[in-house]
Image: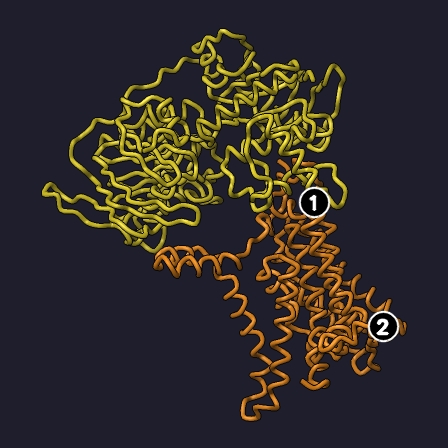
Chain colours: A yellow, B orange
């Protein structure tokens, strides 16, 4: 089915999210849609999928004008959208997830649905058991399930909104193969991303959005620097290696054991040097998040030691089993992936966050002092907001910067979970610039990322996780994406 | 066991019917993502209304219909305030609890002492001849039979039908359900009102079968709160909720049966004991849902840990993720 969007406008308050955007996608093609955060990509996709309505503009399918008032309308017209956050029902079974929203009778024929589902997933080499619960699936599998569901409902147009966020390298390969196959079947694919390499590898045509405007399109061969210029209005070069290494150890982790409902991690040994960045790679749920939480003192390990080296004579303190506050008092700081849920407090302003993070001196909050501190931090960390801005009003990049600004000194070990997930390249580079400063002051960083580029680029050493197993530390300079990808996928383990 | 004791034991199924109706109603409502906190008040008001209408018209049918209408009306107010006006469900529900309770005692005063109307018992042929089960389960009034049926219907509706899956969906991930074409807010209205009507039938059942309307001495006060607790600890599952209801009434029955056997113990203890015992039992059943239990378990020695954790995980509950939160598709 050919899709044509003509002169779409959408405003949210003062923000003109879509300012007269037109776009044509032919059946059988993969249309890339590039742009940084807030460029209007998601808004346009939500309009096409009926999640929100445009203020003005037309949508044409195969040349015929259609009106889409709700997601139900778009599904009926054959438009399916894969949302950035999986729109499914985690505590329910895969087969029940298929039934919800499908035109079924009161008593759905589960056997028939399962048969159709199995046939469909065989086409794409997926292997999801229809009787499992969705919350036991990985993000990548939930995405596969959602794609299958949309196809099962008869989608002819498929919108994929940042589909590679949070999935593993092998799942990404499978996803790309699937997308190519679907295009070959004659479906129209809209692939929304801010990752240039992916768009270049996959799409038969690319448009770039900036501030709600279509900046122009490009067909292969792509000129990367030109695309970047269209996205940001200027070229960006990635900065080179991050931390200056010092030879002295800061932490020693010995025979650490963690038992979780799904995973048992045994005998983890590694050391952390001052000023070093260690990247943890692996599919989500392979154990890296557990190790990070154990290092932060949030999860109690069932055995082993977390030694902190004190002074030059090599004296060490075992932190394992101590209270979280002890970890924090020793300068260990954890930034979770769920910024608004675990890291920041919704409803409080930036100033109130800074007031909370500082050492409490008196009974009453010293408003003037907090005001000055906030202003200084806001400038230092380039946060777009005022001391009075409530935290949830800030964009993702600004929230992340605010979290960095909240960290107390002295900082000894910084634990980060997906530090740049969902951020555009510019914000990501800014965040890493700030982190690098911390390393120069002697802090160490341990971080998780599903973006292998990020892991290789910013780490000094890399640990790979697979099903609770931990690899020895690799020097980042000696590792390639292919090697990591294989290890993450379970190949090459002895 | 002799027959009189059996019949007395069997009365717990009649007594439990109002609780079962309320728990099923609240389960449906909460599955859709709305909390109807007014249960205690709306049960008292519908008990009064059911009795008043039944004695005035002489018809049980109109009595139960009045009870259902009152429950549905209170539920509608909650739905309108929380879904339509996006106000706090907890605050609105709590105020309505107090208001409906006072209203019931005020409007119900003239009906205290009116001739008692009690639903007559219907024996089910053949089944009532069964040993033990016959007198215990199959010698009841019609609304009690309906309460058995209601549990089965609720279970099938929620877990086996496509509409029930949508119901779970709108309480779990309303945005995802909306993406799939469900009209989240309209469905929430419908389930809140149906749930409220069931609560109202439970109230009417109390004054027309279990006991009678007797103003503040009716004895129904407190049942609504217990029904709310059973809904939660029954993990929003109709069958678990029904078992919880029967367990609670069993505790009450034991209190009454044991009291004459222990004359030295203050009789108030027997009246009050079922409530704390119920809470303790519910806590025990649900303790596995707390994070700290998981962490403590991880420290146990290998052998025992597996057994205990499997036991606790089997009883674990899961609340509808969007319970109590309004939905807006922006």
Q: Residue at x 74, y 71 (%)?
A: B104
Look at the image and tell me in which quarter the C terminus of chain B lies: top right
At which x and y percent is residue A399? 43, 35
Left of A371 or right of it: where is A142? Answer: right
At which x and y percent is residue B26? 67, 59
Q: Residue at x 65, y 28 (%)?
A: A151
Question: Which is nearer the eye, B223 or A453?
Answer: A453
Left of A25 or right of it: where is A201? Answer: left
Residue under pointer 2: B54
Tell me where residue B215 sits by quadrant.
bottom right
Residue B213, placed above or below residue A338: below
Question: Callout 1: helix, strand or loop?
Answer: helix
Residue under pointer 1: B185
- What chain is tagged by disc 2? B
Residue B178, placed above or below residue B299: above
Question: Callout 2: helix, strand or loop?
Answer: helix
| Real-space CA distance between mark 1 and mark 2, rounded to the nearest whole angstrom | 35 Å
Q: Earlier in the sequence, mark 1 or mark 2?
A: 2
List the single residue furthest toward the top.
Answer: A221
């Amino acid at each position: 089915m050919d899709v044509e969007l003509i002169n779409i406008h959408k405003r949210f308050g003062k923000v003109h999210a879509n300012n007269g955007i037109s776009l044509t996608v032919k059946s059988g093609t993969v249309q890339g849609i590039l742009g940084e955060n807030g460029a209007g990509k998601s808004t346009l996709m939500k309009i096409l999928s009926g999640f929100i309505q445009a203020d003005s503009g037309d949508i044409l399918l195969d040349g015929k004008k259609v009106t889409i008032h709700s997601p139900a309308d778009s599904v009926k017209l054959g438009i399916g959208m894969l949302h950035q956050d999986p729109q499914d029902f985690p505590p329910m079974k895969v087969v029940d997830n298929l039934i919800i929203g499908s035109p079924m009778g009161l008593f759905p024929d589960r056997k028939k649905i399962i048969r159709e589902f199995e046939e469909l997933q065989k086409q794409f080499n997926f292997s999801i058991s229809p009787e499992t619960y969705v919350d036991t699936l990985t993000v990548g599998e939930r995405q596969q399930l959602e794609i299958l569901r949309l196809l099962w409902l008869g989608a002819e147009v498929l919108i994929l909104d940042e589909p590679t966020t949070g999935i593993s390298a092998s799942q990404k390969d499978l996803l790309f193969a699937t997308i190519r196959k679907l295009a070959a079947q004659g479906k129209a694919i809209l692939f929304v991303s801010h990752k240039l390499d992916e768009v270049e590898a996959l799409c038969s045509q690319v448009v770039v959005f900036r501030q709600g405007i279509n900046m122009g399109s490009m067909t292969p061969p792509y000129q990367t620097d030109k695309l970047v210029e269209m996205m940001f209005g200027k070229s960006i070069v990635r900065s080179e290696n991050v931390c200056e290494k010092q030879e002295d150890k800061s932490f020693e982790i010995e025979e650490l054991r963690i038992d979780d409902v799904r995973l048992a991690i045994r005998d983890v040994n590694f050391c952390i040097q001052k000023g070093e960045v260690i990247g943890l790679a692996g599919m989500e749920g392979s154990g890296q998040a557990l190790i990070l939480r154990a290092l932060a003192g949030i999860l109690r390990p069932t055995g082993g030691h977390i030694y902190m080296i004190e002074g030059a004579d090599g004296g060490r303190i075992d932190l394992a089993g101590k209270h979280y506050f002890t970890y924090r008092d020793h300068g260990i700081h954890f930034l979770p992936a769920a910024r608004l849920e675990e890291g920041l407090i919704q409803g409080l302003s930036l100033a109130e966050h800074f007031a909370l993070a500082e050492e409490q001196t008196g009974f009453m909050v010293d408003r003037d002092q907090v005001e000055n501190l906030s202003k200084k931090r806001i400038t230092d960390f380039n946060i777009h907001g005022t001391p009075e801005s409530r935290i949830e009003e800030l964009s993702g990049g600004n929230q992340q910067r605010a979290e960095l600004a909240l960290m107390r000194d002295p900082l000894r070990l910084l634990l980060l979970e997906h530090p740049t997930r969902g951020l555009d390249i510019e914000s990501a580079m800014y965040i890493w610039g700030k982190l690098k400063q911390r390393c120069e002051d002697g802090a160490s960083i341990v971080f998780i990322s599903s973006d292998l580029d990020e892991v290789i680029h910013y780490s000094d050493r890399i640990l790979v996780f697979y099903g609770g197993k931990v690899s020895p530390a690799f020097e980042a300079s000696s590792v390639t994406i292919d090697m990591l990808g294989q290890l993450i996928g379970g190949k090459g383990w002895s | 066991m002799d027959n009189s004791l059996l019949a007395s034991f069997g009365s717990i199924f009649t007594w439990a019917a109002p609780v079962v109706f309320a728990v099923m109603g609240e389960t449906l409502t909460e599955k859709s993502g709305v909390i109807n906190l007014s249960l205690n008040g709306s049960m008292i008001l519908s008990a009064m209304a059911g009795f008043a209408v039944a004695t005035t018209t002489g018809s049980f049918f109109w009595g139960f219909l009045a009870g259902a209408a009152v429950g549905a009306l209170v539920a509608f107010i909650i739905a309108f305030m929380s879904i339509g006006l996006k106000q706090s469900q907890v605050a609105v529900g709590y105020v309505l609890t107090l208001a409906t309770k006072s209203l019931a005692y005020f409007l119900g005063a003239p009906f205290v002492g009116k001739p008692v109307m009690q639903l007559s018992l219907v024996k089910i042929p053949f089944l009532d001849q069964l040993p033990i089960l016959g007198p215990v389960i199959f010698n009841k009034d019609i609304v009690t039979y309906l309460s058995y049926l209601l549990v089965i219907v609720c279970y099938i509706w929620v877990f086996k039908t496509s509409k029930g899956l949508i119901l779970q969906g709108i309480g779990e991930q309303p945005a995802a359900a909306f993406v799939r074409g469900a009209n989240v807010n309209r469905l929430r209205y419908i389930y809140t009102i149906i749930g409220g009507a069931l609560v109202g039938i439970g109230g009417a059942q109390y004054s027309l079968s279990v006991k009678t309307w007797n103003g503040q001495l009716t004895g129904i006060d407190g049942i609504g709160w217990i029904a709310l607790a059973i809904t939660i600890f029954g993990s929003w599952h109709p069958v678990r909720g029904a078992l919880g209801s029967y367990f609670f009434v069993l505790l009450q029955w034991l209190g009454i049966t044991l009291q004459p056997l222990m004359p030295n113990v203050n009789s108030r203890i027997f009246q009050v004991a079922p409530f704390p015992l119920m809470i303790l039992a519910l806590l025990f059943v649900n303790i596995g849902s707390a994070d700290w239990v998981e962490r403590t378990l991880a420290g146990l020695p290998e052998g025992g840990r597996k057994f205990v954790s499997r036991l606790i995980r089997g009883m674990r509950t899961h609340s509808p993720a969007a319970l109590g939160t309004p939905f807006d598709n922006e």
